[in-house]
Amino acid sequence: FFVDNVLPEIENKTKIHIINKDPLKYGIELKNNDYNYIFVDIYNSAEEGIPTYLELKNKLSRIPYCQSFYYQEESIITLLEFEVTNALLKPSSNEISKKLTNYKFVNIYDYRKIFTFKSLLELYKK
């Protein structure tokens, strides 16, 4: 799709390198100055993409000068937020509920903080 529909519309297409490899393996090979921007399109649905998304976010976080964008990222984050909301409202024995017991919620700001992107990634780290 990208090569046929998106790439022809891009002005500086010679600067774009399409890499068709397993991103989890290739992400390990990347160095700090290899790329300025990475777009990852590896899953069909947000639900399907959560494990890979979380693992890649963790691996690519070691490359500070490279921005990364993930297909359906907003949907994935919304699903993560939904799971946290569910765990807060109906605590259970699942991993997220267990991790949330380590948090001290005193006021609304403590709850808001748990929904920051950084906090969500921390909650879902293995």
Image (cartoon, rainbow, N blue to C red):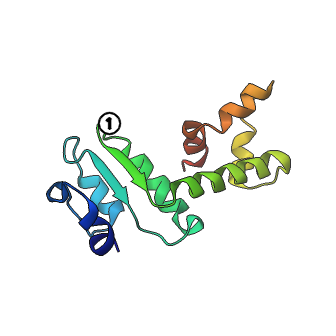
Residue 1 pos. (x, y %) = 35, 75
Residue 116 seen = yes
Q: Check disc 1 and report its element: helix, strand or loop.
A: loop
Please name the residue that numbered disc 1 is placed on: 64
Residue 97 pos. (x, y %) = 75, 48
Type of amino acid at the residue the image marks with label 1? Pro
Left or right of 59 in this view: 4: left
Tell me if residue 12 comes above or below residue 46 in the rendering.
Answer: above
**Point 55% across, 44% down: residue:** 121
Residue 75 pos. (x, y %) = 59, 57
Q: Nearer the viewer, residue 113 or 16?
A: 16
Q: Residue furthest right?
A: 90
Residue 123 pos. (x, y %) = 61, 44
Locate residue 100: give its quadrant: top right
Residue 103 seen = no
**Point 67% across, 49% down: residue:** 81
Locate residue 12: give its quadrant: bottom left
**Point 54% across, 60% down: residue:** 50
Left or right of 42 in this view: 112: right
Q: Nearer the viewer, residue 74 or 26?
A: 74
**Point 46% across, 61% down: residue:** 71
